[in-house]
Image: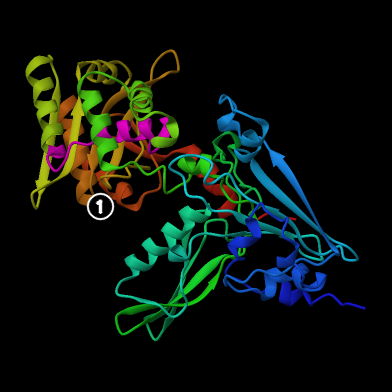
Amino acid sequence: METNPPTSELMSPVHSFPNRFFCSDFQNDEEFNAPASVYTYMHVDCSRSSEAPVRSPDVVISNNFMNNAFNDDQVMDNEEASQDSHMQAMTVAVSGSSHGPSMFAESSRGQLDGWPSNPYFVFDTPQGTRYWIPNVADKFIPVCGKSYPTFADVLSMYELYAFEAGFSVSKGQTKVWNGIPTHKYLRCSKYGKPQPKRTFDTLDESSVKHRRTNFTWCDCKASILVSISNDSYTVLSFNDIHNHELVESYNCDLSKISRKLSFSTKQFIHNMSLNRIGPMRAYRCLVALKGGHHNVNGTPVDFKNFSHQLRIFIGERDAQVFLERLRERFDNLPNFYFDYTVSNGKLSSVFWADEISKLNYKAFGDVLAFDATYNTNRYKMVFVPFTGVDHHFQCVTFGAGLISTESIESYVWLLKAFLKAHGTQPILVLSDQDPSMLQAVPMVFTESRHRLCMWHIMKKLPSKVSLIC
């Protein structure tokens, strides 16, 4: 009586199955005379040789033809030609055993012109877990023991294999010994255990936002391990078993590596924007020119994101352009005021206030509130708006400034620029608990009272005061 192999053996990494398992001609009985047990666990013991196992009388082969959605509009000459153009799924049932490879499914790669022809394998473990193993050409498969001069070459090799197989790559952890990296992992992008939805302990529930995404981790173990020694990178181990479905060829244009915009695509978007054509129309034009969306790098969202980055990009003269805009407003708008300072050739501080801001301060400037919690991501400068409240209990602006550092000197300069623009000091000044601000306000506004904002106090109260049982 036959016994099943242990689970650890079923879980052992393998490179792939022989390509001959996917041939559609199973009529030659002389090629398939192996015992059923050998064929059942062939995914564990077989190598990538040209010798195929022979069929046992216990093995039953059934062919299920699936329609190819991309060939529905073609008229075939006869029924046999129509069947030859369909994708084939071969189900292998071994009598007397419920384990082993329950399905050999050939993907639609190769059914479309321009896409690689790579079948994949699907099999089940005795515990009921399903696994996918890609089967690509030998020239794309990572070879254990092969060395590369740089890590970029290893990454390019594995990314090319991942594209042919139908998954994305992410960089894994690096092992370090005495401060020197010794090993590096390259993993499937679905590596990692699923994370539960994060909960936030906050007073303002409306501020809690979760990013919408359909990407999930499933702890996929497919990876390669690279050894780093003597300025060379050697592949030590390779695991190609995935616990998730692989990407079909007609969806490869939506993968992460294919969505990366090429230089020609970026140049096309830029040229279209110069002719006042938006990103959506540019995407539709490029799809029409290349004959389909699967021939275009990126999605409409990627086109819009790059168009947005293109509009906000100015270059190394961005600070100079900003000051020129302020000078234009000073020359053309009445009662406009601005001032700035430069440190080591870089813009360090700037303040501006227009006529409306001055009128608002003249009418409602008894109480002044300014907050320095807004930090820009790109230029690492702190945005400081000066605000107040009008007779309709609506916020009004008295001016705004940008400072590079939250030091006492920066706040002193900013408050002096505010005082120079408006001419009078407020009666009450509200601010947060910044230590530099606490010292700068009395130095400039000598006639004003300085108080802390109640909103900041209540926000920090739960963390500063422990609960009394």
Label 1: few (<14), some or many (≥20) within 10 Å? some
Q: Is residue 388 above or below residue 38?
A: above
Q: Residue at x 65, y 60 (%)?
A: 21
Residue indicated by mark 1: 407
Expressed as whole percent of the image width and height from the top left, the position of residue 304 reads: 37, 30
In x, y percent, where is residue 391? 41, 13
Q: Position of residue 394 (x, y in %)?
A: 43, 18
Residue at x 52%, y 44% (from the top left corner): 249
The chief SS type of the magenta part is: helix
Q: Which quadrant, please, contains the C terminus?
A: bottom right
Residue 300 drawn at (x, y percent): 42, 30
User: Which is nearer the eye, 92 or 409?
Assistant: 92
Q: Quadrant of the N terminus?
A: bottom right
Q: Nearer the viewer, residue 277 or 427?
A: 277
Figure coloring: rainbow
- Position of 412 relative to 61 (above/below): above
User: Which residue is farthest right?
Assistant: 1
**Which residue shows up at 77% across the image and 70% down it?**
33
Q: Which element is circle 1 on? A: loop
Task: Residue 309: say if magenta.
Answer: yes
Horizontal side, residue 358 vs residue 226: left or right:
left
Look at label 1 and name its amino acid. Ser
Kindly tell me whether residue 15 is visible in this rendering.
yes
Q: How many marks?
A: 1
Is 417 contained in the magenta span?
no
Q: Is residue 398 above or below residue 18?
A: above
Q: Is residue 445 visible?
A: no
Question: Which quadrant of the structure image shows residue 443?
Answer: top left
Q: Which residues are magenta?
A: 296-319
